[in-house]
Image (cartoon, rainbow, N blue to C red):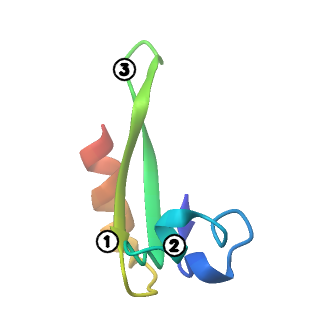
Amino acid sequence: MEVPGALDEERFSSSPLVLGDSNIRFYAGVPLRSAAGHSYGTLCVIDTTQRELTLEQRNQLIRLAR
């Protein structure tokens, strides 16, 4: 999941992490799963600047999550 502008995204816009001192503006996350398909959590990246991942960055994040 990628949220290029957290302040503009309804699901994130009221979050204390977006409105507070953390000032998060970008979020991207990929599920962490075992080989058997069990979910462990999420590998995510955040930034205080709105952005979009490049295709290469998106692929790297997916590779890291594996």
Screen quadrant of the N terminus? bottom right
Q: Residue at x 38, y 75 (%)?
A: 21
Q: Residue at x 38, y 65 (%)?
A: 58
The secondary structure type at the circle numbered 1 is helix
Amino acid tagged 3: Ser
Screen quadrant of the C terminus? top left
Q: What crowding class fits label 1: few (fewer than 14 Cα within 10 Å), some (14-19), or many (20 or more)?
A: few
Q: Are marks 3 and 2 in contact (CB under 8 Å)?
A: no
Q: What's the mark number on residue 28?
A: none
Q: Nearer the viewer, mark 1 or mark 2?
A: 2
Indicate left or right for 65 with 26 as reference. Answer: left
Q: Nearer the viewer, mark 1 or mark 3?
A: 3
Among numbered discs 3 and 2, the one appearing first in the sequence: 2
Indicate left or right for 54 with 18 as reference. Answer: left
Percent across and percent down for residue 61 are 32, 56
Q: Quadrant of residue 14?
A: bottom right
Query: Is 54 situated above or below 1?
Result: below
Q: Nearer the viewer, mark 3 or mark 2?
A: 2
Q: Which residue is mark 3?
A: 34
Among numbered discs 1 and 2, the one appearing first in the sequence: 2
Q: Which residue is mark 1?
A: 56
Q: Residue at x 36, y 67 (%)?
A: 46
- Report the front residue among 1 and 16: 16
Amino acid tagged 2: Val
- Spatial separation of the CA atoms under disc 1 and disc 3: 23 Å
Q: What crowding class fits label 3: few (fewer than 14 Cα within 10 Å), some (14-19), or many (20 or more)?
A: few
Among numbered discs 1 and 3, the one appearing first in the sequence: 3
- Spatial separation of the CA atoms under disc 1 and disc 2: 26 Å
The secondary structure type at the circle numbered 3 is loop
Q: Which residue is mark 2?
A: 18
Q: What crowding class fits label 2: few (fewer than 14 Cα within 10 Å), some (14-19), or many (20 or more)?
A: some
- Spatial separation of the CA atoms under disc 3 and disc 2: 30 Å
